[in-house]
Amino acid sequence: MSNTANLELEGKTYSLPVVSGSENEKAIAIGSLRDTTGYITLDDGYGNTGSCSSKITFIDGEKGILRYRGIPIEELSEKSSFIETAYLLIYGELPDHAQLRAFSDLLTQNANLHEDMKHHFEGFPPNAHPMAILSAMINASSCFYPGLMGRANKERFDIHAARLLSQVRTIAAFSYRKSRGLPTMYPKPVYKYTANFLHMMFSEPYQDYQLKPEVVKALDLIFLLHADHEQNCSTATVRMVASSQANLFACAAAGVCALWGPLHGGANQAVIEMLQDIHESGDDGSRFIQAAKDKNSGQKLMGFGHRVYKNYDPRAKIIKVACDNLLNTLHVSDPLLDIAKHLEEAALRDDYFVSRKLYPNVDFYSGIIMRALGIPVEMFTVIFAIGRMPGWIANFKEILDDPKSRIYRPRQVYQGPTLRPYVSIDQRP
C-alpha cells in the first residue's frame, strides 16, 4: 500500500504522507498543505480531523472497543481500581506495589485544601451550580502553591498531578456541602480515594457515613469507566490550553467548563430529568417509548445510543451488571428506577431501537446508580469530572513531554464582508 496520498489542485498534484497508528488507523498528514498549496482543509466540528497523536486511549466505535494504554476496559473494571487505573493512564504502565503505595500516599498527603480557600466557598451563593464552583476553585487552588503559577513545570509534575487528582474530590464535596448549608467534612487519611469522597459528601460531625463496600465499589467503577475517552470535547480543550504552556490546574479548570455543557457531561443528568418528566406525566414509560419512535413527537430517549459507538457501548455492558447488583443489594424502591428498567427492557427488545443500535449507554446506567447512591442530580457532572481527571492529566503530560509541541492554532475559512470603508455615524442608514 502506498504511504502517500495524491491531491490534485488547479492542475497540480501534491503528495501527502499517510500515517498509520499502532491499531492500523490511517491518517493523511496535512501539516504542510497550506505552505505548499495555499489551501487548508475545512472540517466543521473536527469530526474527521486528527488533532494529535496519542498513546493513551484507543477506541473502535464500530466494534465497541475501549482500551486504556492497550488494556481492555473489561479487564480493568474487573481487576483494577480507579487509582491504579489513574496511574496507568498518567504514567503509561501499571504500577508495582511500591509505585502504587507511593502514588496513594501522595494523594493522601494532598487531599486537604489550603484553609484560606474556605473563604472562597463562602463567596458563592447557596444556589451556585457545583460545576461553576468546581472550575473556579480548581483555578483558585493553584494560587496557593508556589511553582504552579506560570509555565507548566516538568520537575514538579508528580506533585501537581497528585494534588489536582486528590483535591478535585475535596472541592467537589465541599461545594456539595456548601449548596446544602452543611458543615464542611475534612478528608480522613484512613480512607481510600473513593471512600474518602463519600465520607466528605455524606458524613456528619457527630456520625461518619456508613461506607458500604458495594456502594464504594459502584462509585469507584463509575470513576474508572469515565477516566478517559480519547479526544472528546473536554479533553481536546485541556490539550488546547496545555499547548499554550498554561499550568495543569488552569487546563483542568478549562476542561471542567467544557464538560459542563449539556451535550457533553450533562448526559447522565438528562437521563434522570427524562425519568422525572415521565413519572410526573403519570406514565410508566410505555407511552414515552411509543412517542420516542415518532420523529414528530419531540420526545427523545436520553441515555441511548452514542456518537462514537455504533455498537454496544462497552462501558454500558460493564456498568449494567454493576447497576443490577447494586439495586438488588440496596433494595432500592424508587419509581424513577422502575421506569428506567422498563425503558431499558423495551429498548433492548424493540426492533425500532435494536435496528438503529440505540442501546443503553454508560450515561443511562451511571445516572441510575448515582441516584440510587443518593447523589443529587446537580452533582452528576461533577462526578464525571472527578472520573475524567486522570485522562486530562495524562493528555496534559503528553503535551508537556513533547519537545516538538507548539501552541494549537486552528485555521478558518472567512465568510464575512470583503474590504469596505468605515462610514461615520451620521452617514449610516
Image (cartoon, helix red, strand yellow):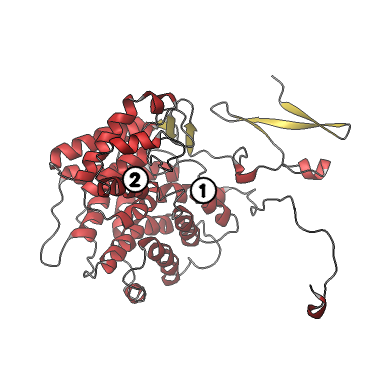
> In the shown orientation, is residue 41 left or right of residue 100?
right
- Cα distance in 3D space between marks 2 and 1: 20 Å
Q: Which secondary structure lies at badge 1? A: helix
Residue beneath label 2, please? 271
Tell me the quarter of the picture where residue 343 sits.
Answer: top left
Residue beneath label 1, please? 233
Number of residue marks: 2
**Residue 277 percent coordinates (x, y):** 31, 49
Above or below 425: residue 85: above
- Residue at 34% across, 60% down: 167
**Residue 48 percent coordinates (x, y):** 61, 37
**Residue 227 percent coordinates (x, y):** 39, 44
Q: Which secondary structure lies at badge 2? A: helix
Q: Amino acid at mark 2?
A: Val
Query: Which quarter of the figure is the N terminus placed in?
Result: top right
Q: Residues within 10 Å of mark 2 (few under 14, many from 20)?
A: many
> In the shown orientation, is residue 182 left or right of residue 381?
left
Residues 284 and 110: in front is 284
Identify the residue at the far top of this view.
1
**Residue 151 percent coordinates (x, y):** 56, 63
- Residue at 46% across, 36% down: 295
Identify the residue at the far front of this view.
296
Q: Amino acid at mark 1?
A: Cys
Tell me the quarter of the picture where residue 271 sits.
Answer: top left
Name the disc covering residue 270, or none: none
Tell me the quarter of the picture where residue 38 sits.
Answer: top right
- Residue at 54% across, 40% down: 54
User: In this orientation, does residue 175 appear?
Assistant: yes
Query: Which quarter of the figure is the C terminus placed in?
Result: bottom right
